[in-house]
Image (cartoon, rainbow, N blue to C red):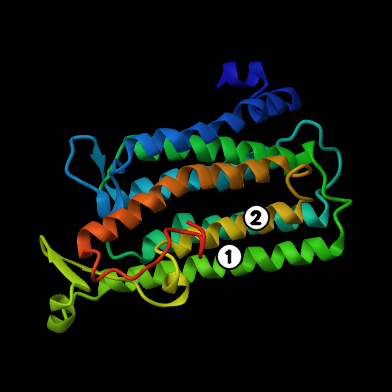
Amino acid sequence: MDFLRTAGFVPLTRDNWELLMTYWKYFTLICPAQLILKDWYPMGKTSYKSILNVPGKPAWILMELVSPLTMLYTVSTNPERTQPLSYIHLWLVALYCLHYTNRALISPLMNHSMAPINIILPIGAAFFNLMNGSLIGGWLGGYGSAKDVPTWQVIAGSVLFVTGLFGNVYHDEVLREIRRDKRVDKNAEKEGKVVVENGRVYKIPEGGLFKWVWHPHYFSEWAEWYGYMMIGGGFSSFRPAGLFVVNEVATMLPRALQGKRWYLNKFGKNAVPDRKAVVPGVI
């Protein structure tokens, strides 16, 4: 800790914040790496037995809490801030905490159970959240400003954020309800719409944007954070939020493509509806 304090990372100085910003843009290289690994993603429905597995629910909660806690710490300890946060910055802090209250606490605690996770994934996610929380927190704490953002843009971005958050919560609940419902419709099973394997019941999700894509909760989250970026002024102004959107797409798009393949393999082409992986009508 003394080293981090002496080096200017705790609290995070402007020079080190800029340094992290410079290198964080290269995180997008995770996308081609994941595409090469293709079907390796040992968590959730694609989890498998391994000596590296850890319990899913506590691992998820701990890795996701890193983001809001880091953001709040970085905002509160910004060494250059001499005045209270503006209303827009306070609003952005509140929205960030709202998202992670759901993602880190409400959502996993509502799950009856979560599959084991390979330890590599929560470590990687914790690093991602540490970087993201530090960069967005640095901007909100004083290294950036949203004072010149037009009111209409703040309102539009807020509406998009809330809409995306609602979509994320709604579609997560659709998937959660499938995991809760252990009943098997024999006719649906004959038609290939239900698969029972190792005591687990798999069903094709229906409702909302599932009509067009297999991962509407991903698409909703991207919309959510795009709205967040808008509130802060857009990509050129609110660079950490812009990189957050880009990096989320880079890491979640390969997972969505893998998920579509999983549904095709699990249910067969004849039973699976014609849906895109994540963006309606695009991919």
Q: Which element carries disc 1, helix, strand or loop?
A: helix
Q: Is residue 114 visible?
A: no
Going by the picture, which residue comes out furthest to the right?
148
| Among the 4 quarters of the image, the one containing residue 191 | bottom left
Separation of marks 2 and 1 at Cα, in angstroms: 9 Å
At horizontal 60% and vertical 47% (from top left) the residue drawn is 245
Where is residue 28? Give x, y as percent: 54, 35
Where is residue 49? Give x, y as percent: 16, 43
Residue that badge 1 annotates: 164
Q: Is residue 255 visible?
A: yes
The type of residue carrying mark 2 is Tyr
The type of residue carrying mark 1 is Gly
- Looking at the image, residue 13 sits to the left or right of residue 33; the answer is right
At horizontal 61% and vertical 69% (from top left) the residue drawn is 163
Q: Nearer the viewer, residue 148 or 98?
A: 148
Please say if the residues under marks 2 and 1 sit with CB atoms less than 8 Å apart.
yes
The quarter of the rendered structure image containing the N terminus is top right
Residue that badge 2 annotates: 226
- Looking at the image, residue 96 sits to the left or right of residue 35; the answer is right
Where is residue 106? Give x, y as percent: 45, 63
At horizontal 79% and vertical 43% (from top left) the residue drawn is 237
- Looking at the image, residue 24 sits to the left or right of residue 58; the answer is right
